[in-house]
Amino acid sequence: MNKRIIDIVGKFDVLALTFITLLLYANGIFNDFVEYDDYIFFHENEAFLEGTLEAFVSFIKKPFQGHYQPVTWLCFFVVKKLFGLNAMAFKMMSIVAHLTCGILVLRILKKLLSNSLTSFMLSVLFIVAPLHSEAVLQASGFGTLLSAMLGLISFHFFLKFERKNHRSQIALSALFYILAVLAKSSMVLLPLLFVVRFQWPQKAIFPSQNRIVLQAVFLTLVSCFAVLTYLSVNSFDAVNNTLMTEMSALKRLALIPVLLLYYPFKLIIPIHFSTPYFIPFQNNTAVFVLMSIVALMIICIFTYAFLKSKKPWHKGIIFYIVMMLPLIQIIPFGDNPINDRYGYFSILGILMAIGIAIEYTQQIRYPKFLVLAVSCLILFSMYQTAHRISAWQNSITLYEDCRSKWPNHPYPYYALAVIQTNNSENTKALKYFKKAKELGIKNATSLYYESLNHIALENYKSAAL
């Protein structure tokens, strides 16, 4: 690739990244809150609706929905104080956070890679990936974006510390790590990456004694926040109903290799496939086992390649696996795994691996066909993300889209029934409840909502049944 073009890209990369982000997510600014955590976080949260200082302090004193994230709630309270419960304000905050993360990813990749065009194209892929749109489009997912942003800043300062060995850099790295964990606990294992990097000989620019002290400090931070995270998760009564705890031991075991490949697969093959669309697989053990066998075979192939290769591209994989540990539940805390937004930060490791592999296999040169291939992937990702933005306009459009993808699964019908009940569209709600019941959903909650609709329509005899 012409060196002049690479130099031009290097000068205007941040501007171009900003333009692409705003162009792609412009329509998303006008999307409404969705009945997918947003209502639990905002509309049904009395302490948040109250909006007082005492109400905010309550989020400092105890976790909410199993997550202790006072820094995120501080941002929510500030936005509500300035703009009210305005969906547009919350969406704009998420888009700005996503853009900031994209710029930080660009800066980090430019430190780790020698080719500015490689860094730019991978950063664009990070911005436009449908995998990340869930965190941006769901207002309550802002905690994921904020935690990732603070975690990226922490990693950025750590990389600066490696090069300059200034104590202020490592202090700032630790500070932003603490803020990242207080924004969302999914960042709790980040310092393990720093400990791993201390072991790489080419980065050991400081005395071994100092290295041991710093490792001890970071491991202590991880231990303290791991305990806090564990206590927060286990304080949430509903945690016993999460996806992982509902699974059999066989499904839990089968899910681990599947999850390790789920996010890279979604990045490279950006199919329209997010959390609500994955739920039909929960009840199919055979599918899980088959997916697990295929995923395990792929992981074995990659492991063999690591052992044979002398190139450092596996370091990105180490980054990815460490940040995935809470999701695959090897560590006894973390988020539900099948959520696109929870792979938001860890996918940086995959980008690092791809970038390093490209540079070594192509001798830091970009053949035209490679630029074309990456460009096509970016364009297809933008198309898929634009489609998802359209689907996430509001709660009804989201689950109608799910219903079109899975017409024989009860979950989309049940979700639509609950939404229509809250909208006082009782006839429509009963129609969806009937379909959900035919497809297998019949529990106390569904019967309760169904009775509410019958009462609203004055069908008291049906409500009694």
Image: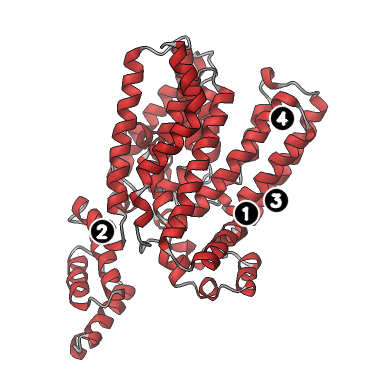
Q: Nearer the viewer, residue 142 or 253?
A: 142
Q: Can you identify the residue that label 2 sits on?
A: 397
Question: Marks 1 and 4: in contact by CB < 8 Å?
Answer: no
Q: Position of residue 415 (x, y in %)?
A: 29, 65
Name which residue lies at 18% across and 77% down: 427
Question: Marks 2 and 1: in contact by CB < 8 Å?
Answer: no
Residue 377 appears in the rendering = yes
CA gap, disc 3 and disc 4? 23 Å
Q: Position of residue 212 (x, y in %)?
A: 78, 31
Name which residue lies at 24% across and 85% down: 456
- Could you tell which of marks 1 and 2 lies nearer the N-terminus? 1
Q: Can you identify the residue that label 3 sits on?
A: 224
Image height check: is 256 above or below 456? above
Disc 3 marks a residue whose amino acid type is Cys
Quarter of the picture holding the C terminus? bottom left
Q: Position of residue 7 (x, y in %)?
A: 49, 17
- Could you tell which of marks 4 and 2 lies nearer the N-terminus? 4
Disc 4 marks a residue whose amino acid type is Phe
CA gap, disc 1 and disc 3? 12 Å
CA gap, disc 4 and disc 1? 23 Å
Q: Position of residue 380 (x, y in %)?
A: 29, 33
Q: From the image, state whether disc 1 or disc 2 is nearer to you.
A: 2
- The disc placed on residue 161 is 4
Question: Marks 2 and 4: in contact by CB < 8 Å?
Answer: no
Q: Element at badge 1?
A: helix
